Amino acid sequence: MTDPQVAIVMLGLFVLIVLLGFPIAFTLIAMGLAFGYYAYATPDQLDKIFDNRIFDLFVQNTFSVMSNDVLVAVPLFLFMGYVVERANIVNRLFFSLQMAARHLPGSMAVAALATCAIFATATGIIGAVVTLMGLLAFPVMLKAGYNPRFAAGVICAGGCLGILIPPSIMLIVYAAIAQLSPVRLYAAALIPGMMLAFMYMVYVVGRAALNPALAPKPPEEEVPPFWGIIWSLVTSFVPLAVLIMSVLGAILLGIATPAEAAGVGSFGGLFLAVCYRALTWQRLKEAVFLTARTSAMVCWLFVGSWTFASVFSYLGGHALIEEWVLALELSPVGFLILAQLIIFLLGWPLEWSEIIIIFVPIFLPMLDTFGIDPLFFGILVALNLQTSFLTPPMAMAAYYLKGVAPKHVELIEIFRGIMPFLLIVILAMVLLYNFPGLALWLPVYFFG
């Protein structure tokens, strides 16, 4: 068996083991070390078991991850999001937006999508947004008479916006992988992210207007006085909006690096929690623990993936796939469609982290050949990964919601509710294909 064939076996074995339920990060490390030991073995190592270059590579990769300045922003943004989540700030935000939008058809659904979009900019954690909104907004929508399928689709689709809307953790990871400026990547993602959220809202309002039984309006007796709604917005929406705009504005205007802005955002989240008298020692401990756990997962994924990818490339796996793609003699559009189709299919069994860290680097060296901007490619991937969370049978957003939904809401109903939003994501990808300026105009405007 040739080395490139061994590399393909390595890749296939990784997917199989992950599907069996083994931890992804440590599977990557174990396979990288095992196949790397074979790849770097020399005839004189029979009596020197640990005298193999793979161990030096593993140590170097670990040090590189721990010293990567871009990744410093990950735990800080995570901490900001978890503090905002634990301090019940989102509860106030949803209620105030729901009352402010009460005259719109599907006002609760619109408020849920707006809350998801705002919370996504504060955290970028998909599971946290879907779960929290599933606990907070989903029961309220069902109690108000909303169709369970319609409400489930809103929660799942809105909760996935954190992949795309800055400060998305996925974008930070992609920036580190592609060696891009995370600031430019954030600027590129801003318009497509807001566009997708707006398209969701247009669909929700239109659908509720055509079929009011799907989303009944709140009874007038449940609506607080006008000044009560204004006060609720001032005390919930405005502080969180100021925090988020300050963080993103500092990044986009070049006042602060993502890590510095995330640090300020973390302190801002703590300040808001104190002002709302919602910061307890228990909640602070939970936020710190969740931040440490998620950050460790991201870092070990990087260590494992860089080791795995290095061995895979050394064995000739990347070159073999690149030769196969180039042999197809595709146009740039054909290459983009092929790459996005592969990523779409990979999104069924795998999560975004494995796709970004393992499979996206396979396509990155080919972007120059086809004349494709890596910024544009990254935003397409981020949009595409929305579909991986929304496509049955492995739609993770649906499983997150099912875990906290009432028992009478079946998984198949959640899947059916997701489908219209999945089509909207695909439509957004088509728009981005045809109008690349949606992603590329803002980075050029800010940074030239």
Image (spheres, helix red, strand yellow):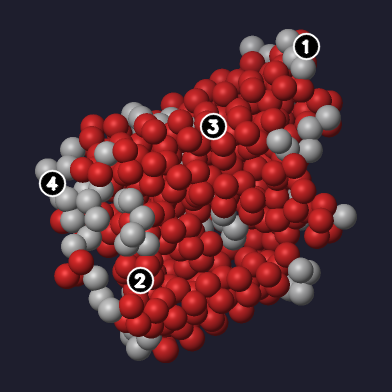
Which residue occupies the foreground of this view, 27 or 435? 435
Which residue occupies the foreground of this view, 404 or 25? 404
Q: Are marks 2 and 4 in contact (CB under 8 Å)?
A: no
The C terminus lies in which quarter of the figure?
A: bottom right
Q: In percent of the image, x 41 and y 76: which residue is there?
A: 233
Q: Secondary structure at mark 2?
A: helix
Q: Alpha-carbon distance for marks 2 and 4?
A: 28 Å
Q: Is residue 392 above or below residue 48?
A: above
At label 3, which amino acid type do we have? Leu
Q: Are marks 1 and 4 in contact (CB under 8 Å)?
A: no
At label 2, which amino acid type do we have? Ser
Mark 2 or 3, nearer chain start: 2
Q: Is residue 59 shown to the viewer in this render?
A: no
Q: Alpha-carbon distance for marks 1 and 3?
A: 27 Å
User: In the orientation shown, which residue stands out farthest toward the right?
Assistant: 448
Q: Secondary structure at mark 4?
A: loop
Q: Looking at the image, how many numbered discs can be counted on the residues?
A: 4
Residue 98: x and y, percent? 33, 64
Q: Residues within 10 Å of mark 4 (few under 14, many from 20)?
A: few
Which one is in front in this view, the residue at disc 2 or the one at disc 4?
2
Q: Is residue 424 above or below residue 292?
A: above
Q: Alpha-carbon distance for marks 1 and 2?
A: 54 Å
Q: Residues within 10 Å of mark 2 (few under 14, many from 20)?
A: many
Q: Is residue 414 shown to the viewer in this render?
A: yes
Q: Which mark is residue 96?
A: 2
Q: Which mark is residue 427?
A: 3
Residue position marked by numbered label 1 in the rendering: 329
